[in-house]
Amino acid sequence: MRELFVYYRVDAANAAAARHAVRAMHERLRHDHPGLEARLLIRAGDGSTPLTWMETYALPDSAVGIDASLEAVIDAAAGDWRDLVAGPRHVEAFIASD
C-alpha cells in the first residue's frame, strides 16, 4: 500500500494560520475520500524558524493506497494555503512492507 509523506517549512509567524488551513484541508479530504488517514506532524523540539512540518496520508482499506490521482487532489488542495509555507513542499511516497 502506497503512503505519502509531505514535508515543508513554516515560519513561526504563520504557524497558527497554517495549522488551521492544514486541519481544514484534512477534514475536507477525509470527507471526500472515506477511509483516508491524514495527519500533521511537527518536528519535536524544533526551536528553529522556519519549523519543519510533515503531513502523512494513507488509505489502509485500499490495496493500492494513495494513487497518483489522489496525490494530485492532495497537492491541489494544498494550493489554497501555499503562501503560508516557507519554500517548496516535498513529496515522498513509500510502500508499506506489511
Image (cartoon, rainbow, N blue to C red):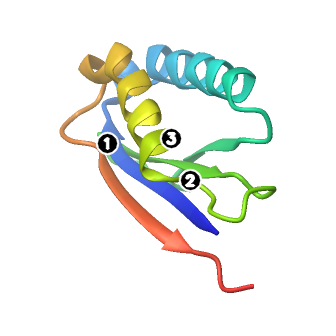
Does label 3 or label 1 sit earlier along the sequence? 1
Q: Quadrant of the N terminus?
A: bottom right
Distance between mark 2 and mark 3 Cα atoms: 6 Å
**Residue beneath the point at 43% across and 23% down:** 77
- Apparent side of residue 22 relative to residue 15 in the rendered image (left or right): right
Q: Secondary structure at mark 3?
A: helix
- Residue type at mark 3 is Leu
**Residue beneath the point at 29% across and 43% down:** 89
Residue 57 x/y as whole percent? 60, 49
Distance between mark 1 and mark 2 Cα atoms: 23 Å
Residue 63's place in the image compared with 83, above or below, is: below
Depth check: give the residue in front, 65 or 90.
65
Binning the other alpha carbons within 10 Å of mark 1 as few (below 14), some (14 to 19) or many (20 upward) gives many
**Residue beneath the point at 24% across and 18% down:** 83
- Residue type at mark 1 is Arg
Q: Are marks 3 and 1 in contact (CB under 8 Å)?
A: no
Q: Are marks 2 and 3 in contact (CB under 8 Å)?
A: yes
Q: Which residue is mark 3?
A: 70
Residue 85 x/y as whole percent? 29, 29
Residue 91's place in the image compared with 17, above or below, is: below
Q: Secondary structure at mark 2?
A: loop
Q: Which residue is mark 2?
A: 66
Q: Which residue is mark 1?
A: 9
Residue reaching furthest to the left: 87
Q: Quadrant of the C terminus?
A: bottom right
Q: Report the mark closest to the observer, 1 or 2.
A: 2
Residue 63's place in the image compared with 75, above or below, is: below
